[in-house]
Image: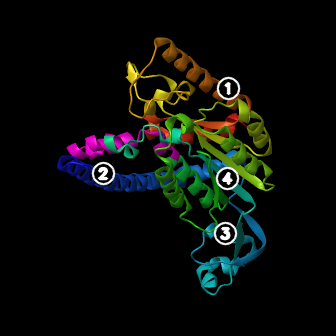
Amino acid sequence: MKTAASKKEAGRRATLEKTLKTHSREIMEEINGEIALNAHKLSNLFLADIIRALFGVERTCEHTSPIIYEMSQDSDLILLDKLNSLQLEKLPFYILNEEVLAKNLQPIIEIEFIALIDLSLSMLYRWPLMNLAFAERFVSTGEMEELKRKCRKTKLYALKYLAYAFLQAALQNGFQTKAIFFGNQMEHEVRAGKDRNFPAFALHYIDEHYQKVYGQAVTSSRYSEIGGYLNAIMKATYNRKKFIVFIISDFLDGIENIKPYLIELNHKRPIIAAVVNDPFEVKFPPRKFLTPVTLTHEHCKNMEQNLGEEIRLSRDLINDYNSTAARRRQDLFDFFNSQRIRHLDIQTQDNHKIPKKIEELDLMILGNS
């Protein structure tokens, strides 16, 4: 039978949890708004142009039949060779009379942009808003800006930023656009259609997905499923249209099992891979005790400790982890380079450098031409 004190404590915890969830939701919306603003700006400034240049595609093509020029259109579209000297002299008059012809540019619709977005639990690594006990520390002291700063240095932040920016650039170029979300024994395909707010929908979908799966066993679902990669990539491979493929993942499972599929994809149409990693996944922090939520290495798969229980790690295990992680990353980038697969190496401590990293893709146009 519950005592009055235990009931009071349970009520206090329920109220605190509700308050934390409200604050977390508000911060999440603010972070998403920040991502949308910056990613949209990035797409407008140069990403849309870089994608067209990298893959040798045009945003529009000229239709054989010209159209009547309208004042709202770019003046460069006017067919000057079809105007006589009088029309050239009194061009505004003839434009108002709808007697000036212009190029009929139609958007290219046969090019499809496919974003493969890894939503495994490993992409949630160190995301503070999912850990209410951790978030409480900042909410109770009013250190909300510090909590937001920690959000900006996570894999989930980088994932959202990249997904929004590239989806926006694809829509801006008039490509048929779709996203394939996969991970945690899930695979879901969504087409943008005529929805210009598709990038914002993607952010919302990612948040909804993690709200549903958070709390699953760390030991069984901390890693990207190879099956998710293969199913998603096979779908893209079987597409008969011209397509551009963009993959966002932490590639924690390595590259061996998906090499043939990536090679086949790359031969059909060049692809871009974004590798998102946290420094703690490459090298253990210098401390003696870590909790299971800190670990993302296969050594932890068979551990039976409950979430939050301390684990003593031997020096041999830490050294083995560090060498394995370093070798995995090196193999991954060696493969990308050997296949001339354009790729982004995103480290979460440098999330603020994502625009610069993407801008450097432009240099690959000359390097791979």
The residue beneath circle 4 is 114
Q: Residue at x 52, y 57 (%)?
A: 205
SS category of the residue bearing label 3: helix
Q: Alpha carbon of mark 3 to alpha carbon of mark 4: how far?
A: 31 Å
Find residue 271 and name its label. Answer: none
The earlier-in-sequence mark between 3 and 4 is 3
The earlier-in-sequence mark between 3 and 2 is 2
The residue beneath circle 2 is 17
Q: Relative to 247, is 150 on the left or the right?
A: left
> Is 10 part of what is drawn in magenta?
no
> Which of 296 and 325 lies nearest the eye of the viewer?
296
The image quadrant of residue 104 is: bottom right
Tell me the magenta residue range: 134-159
Q: Relative to 21, is 6 on the left or the right?
A: left
SS category of the residue bearing label 4: strand
Q: Residue at x 41, y 29 (%)?
A: 291
| 2 or 1: mark nearer the eye | 2
SS category of the residue bearing label 1: helix
Which amino acid is tagged 4?
A: Ile
Q: Relative to 87, is 121 on the left or the right?
A: left
> Is 145 part of what is drawn in magenta?
yes
The earlier-in-sequence mark between 2 and 1 is 2
Q: Alpha carbon of mark 2 to alpha carbon of mark 1: how far?
A: 46 Å
Which amino acid is tagged 1?
A: Asp
> Which of 62 and 202 lies nearest the eye of the viewer?
202
- Quarter placement of the C terminus: top right
